Structure formats: structure tokens, C-alpha cells
């Protein structure tokens, strides 16, 4: 009887382990499938500037999802930023914020005019501090909301819970075996 009980525990532990490994691999598979289905990467908003705020003379990168009909412009730029097509169908350019003549705390509009006639805008805020994260803007400057991949996050959390549950089960099963208590 003792041998059969040990084999059943071993089988249950192996099944739980395989299940948890399958759940832990699910987020990776889901992300790979989503990337394969989505094709080339585009910015989450039609126009972004990164960083979205910074001190004078900060280097910035502008990304647009449309083919521009000219450079990215802003009163905050030292000079207009020419956007070039990147390998993932984005239009990207790098430039600098003016070193003088700007008001700290003020937002300056960044504009890109697309070949299809659409005008994209976002903002850059001049600070006296270190640059912060990228700004996401939509058509006419409307801000994009979200940005997180909630499905992949949920799968990752679920996989983590499954792994933690398996570790707890193995710990308790070994503890019961050592004390001779089965329940």
C-alpha cells in the first residue's frame, strides 16, 4: 500500500508540475503569436516624442506612423527634425531642444503633416530637470490611453500563481511524508 501511495503522489506532483510549466509557457507563446499576427511594429500612438519633457538642449526622438510631408516642427526645436523611414514602417528623426529662449514648465507643440493630409500633434514640456518618459498623442493631439498588453500580463500572473501553487504543494507533500500524516 505504501508503494502505491507514493507512486500516486509522484504522479500527482508530476501532473501538477507539467500543468504549471504549460501555464508558465503560455504568456511567451501568446506574445509570439500576437507579434506574428500583428506584422511590423508601429508606435502605439500616431505621433510620439521621447522623452516627453526635459531641460533645454535635451536630445529628442520623434516617431510618426504616417509618411510625413515635411519635417517635424516645434518652436522648442533647435531646427526642424527630418523624419526617415525605419525598418519597421515608422518614420523616425532625432533632434535637440533649444538651449535658450524657452520657458520652464511650458508645453510646446510638436507637429507633423502627413502626405495624406492629416496633421499629427503632440507636446514637449520644457523642465529644468532630467527627461521623463515618451509622450503618446493621437490625431490633433488627442492622447492615447492604456499602452499595456493586459492579456499577456494576465497570463504571466496566472503562470506565476500556478508555479507558486505547485511549489507549495510539493513543500506540503514532503512535509506530510516526513511526519507520517496523510491529511
Image (tube, grey):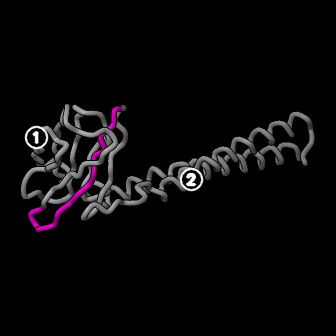
Is 46 covered by the magenta stretch? no
Q: Looking at the image, which residue is at 67% across and 50% down?
A: 16
Q: Residues within 10 Å of mark 1 (few under 14, many from 20)?
A: some
**Total labels drawn:** 2
Q: Looking at the image, which residue is at 37% across and 59% down?
A: 34
Label 1 residue SS: loop
Is 117 covered by the magenta stretch? yes
The label shown at residue 23 is 2
* Residue 88, horizontal then vertical, whole percent: 20, 51
Q: Is residue 113 left or right of residue 104?
A: left
How far separated are the C-alphas under marks 1 and 2? 51 Å
Q: Is residue 132 above or below residue 4?
A: above
* Residue 134, horizontal then vertical, whole percent: 33, 45
Q: Report which quarter residue 171 is drawn in.
A: top right
Q: Looking at the image, which residue is at 28% across and 43% down?
A: 50
Q: Is residue 20 left or right of residue 87?
A: right
- The first of marks 1 and 2 along the sequence is 2
Q: Is residue 52 visible?
A: no
Observer-nearest residue: 144 or 55?
Answer: 55
* Residue 24, horizontal then vertical, whole percent: 55, 48
Q: Residues within 10 Å of mark 2 (few under 14, many from 20)?
A: many
The label shown at residue 79 is 1
Q: Is residue 122 left or right of residue 67?
A: right
Question: Which region shows up in magenta?
Answer: 114-128
Q: Is residue 2 above or below residue 64?
A: above
* Residue 121, horizontal then vertical, whole percent: 23, 57
Q: Looking at the image, which residue is at 90% across and 48% down?
A: 183
The label shown at residue 126 is none
Amino acid at each position: 500500500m505504501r508503494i502505491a501511495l507514493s507512486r500516486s503522489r509522484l504522479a500527482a506532483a508530476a501532473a501538477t508540475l507539467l500543468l504549471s510549466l504549460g501555464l508558465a509557457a503560455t504568456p511567451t507563446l501568446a506574445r509570439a503569436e500576437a507579434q506574428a499576427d500583428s506584422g511590423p511594429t508601429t508606435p502605439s500612438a500616431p505621433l510620439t516624442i521621447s522623452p516627453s519633457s526635459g531641460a533645454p538642449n535635451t536630445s529628442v526622438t520623434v516617431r510618426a506612423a504616417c509618411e510625413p510631408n515635411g519635417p517635424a516642427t516645434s518652436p522648442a526645436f533647435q531646427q526642424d527634425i527630418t523624419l526617415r523611414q525605419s525598418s519597421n514602417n515608422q518614420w523616425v528623426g532625432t533632434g535637440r531642444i533649444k538651449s535658450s529662449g524657452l520657458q520652464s514648465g511650458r508645453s510646446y507643440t510638436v507637429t507633423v503633416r502627413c502626405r495624406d493630409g492629416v496633421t499629427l500633434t503632440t507636446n514637449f514640456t520644457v523642465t529644468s530637470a532630467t527627461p521623463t518618459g515618451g509622450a503618446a498623442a493621437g490625431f490633433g493631439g488627442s492622447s492615447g490611453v492604456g499602452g499595456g498588453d493586459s492579456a499577456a500580463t494576465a497570463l504571466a500572473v496566472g503562470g506565476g500563481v500556478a508555479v507558486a501553487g505547485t511549489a507549495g504543494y510539493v513543500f506540503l507533500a514532503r512535509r506530510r511524508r516526513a511526519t507520517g500524516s496523510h491529511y
